[in-house]
Amino acid sequence: MNIPNKLTVLRLIMVPVFFVSYLISLLPFSSSHVISAVMMFLCYLIAELSDLLDGKIARKYNLVTDLGKVMDPFADTLSHLTFFVCFMSRGIMPVWAFVIIMWREFAILFMRMLMMRAGKAMPANIWGKSKTVLYAVTSIFSIIYIVASAFIVPGSWNSVYETVLYVLFSLSAVASLLSFITYLVSVLKSGALSGMTR
């Protein structure tokens, strides 16, 4: 297994560790909230850095593999949905935004499998890149909120911050939906799936 794929595996390992870290915050001890916040931040940081590095290394040193083509988007979907489940459970992510993003992620995975079977690559689009940036920014702001909540006494700052998070999650859901529609239109226009039997 090459280095990019090992980094993807590291990201997959960080996902359940992040989830366990979140569960620690549910324990009825004040110290557990601080430990959980720090662990969540570190897990997210490692996961995002490994995601950034694996793609750059794979492209720079021509280490793109069939395993990596499948495992990397799977790791992306698993990590994002896990993060968002935790944020939704915490009450800082709207349920409707999560459902839209979840539907989009599973639909894109399905489309990607069909395209790979047809020997075609999924075309990139601006909404897909915007979605990725918004996912990252929203997740960082959410984790900062959780970390801050473990150290700072609740006050008026909570409602202001939660409003900001609501806007960010809403933008993420909209970008997610638009990226899916753009991908779908592009795939249908390409005719890549026309040869598949019903």
Image (cartoon, rainbow, N blue to C red):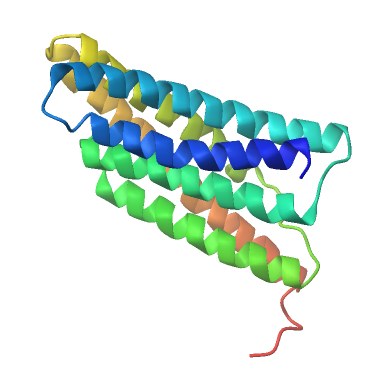
Would you say 59 lies left or right of 67 here? Answer: right
Assign the C terminus to one quadrant of the image.
bottom right
Residue 8 at x, y = what percent? 64, 40
**Compared to 176, does 155 lie above or below?**
above
Picture quarter containing residue 126? top right
| Residue found at x 65% / y 62% | 112
Residue lying farthest to the bottom in this orientation:
198
Picture quarter containing residue 94? top left
Residue 179 at x, y = what percent? 56, 50
Residue lying farthest to the right in this orientation:
62
Nearer to me, 1 or 68: 1
Residue 4 at x, y = what percent? 73, 37
| Residue found at x 25% / y 27% | 163
Nearer to me, 125 or 79: 79
Assign the N terminus to one quadrant of the image.
top right
Residue lying farthest to the front in this orientation:
1
**Compared to 98, does 54 lie above or below?**
above
Would you say 158 lies left or right of 117 here? Answer: left
Picture quarter containing residue 157? top left
Q: How many marks?
A: 0
Residue 145 at x, y = what percent? 29, 20
| Residue found at x 13% / y 22% | 29
| Residue found at x 47% / y 52% | 177
**Compared to 29, does 72 lie above or below?**
below
Q: Is residue 128 visible?
A: yes
Nearer to me, 7 or 140: 7
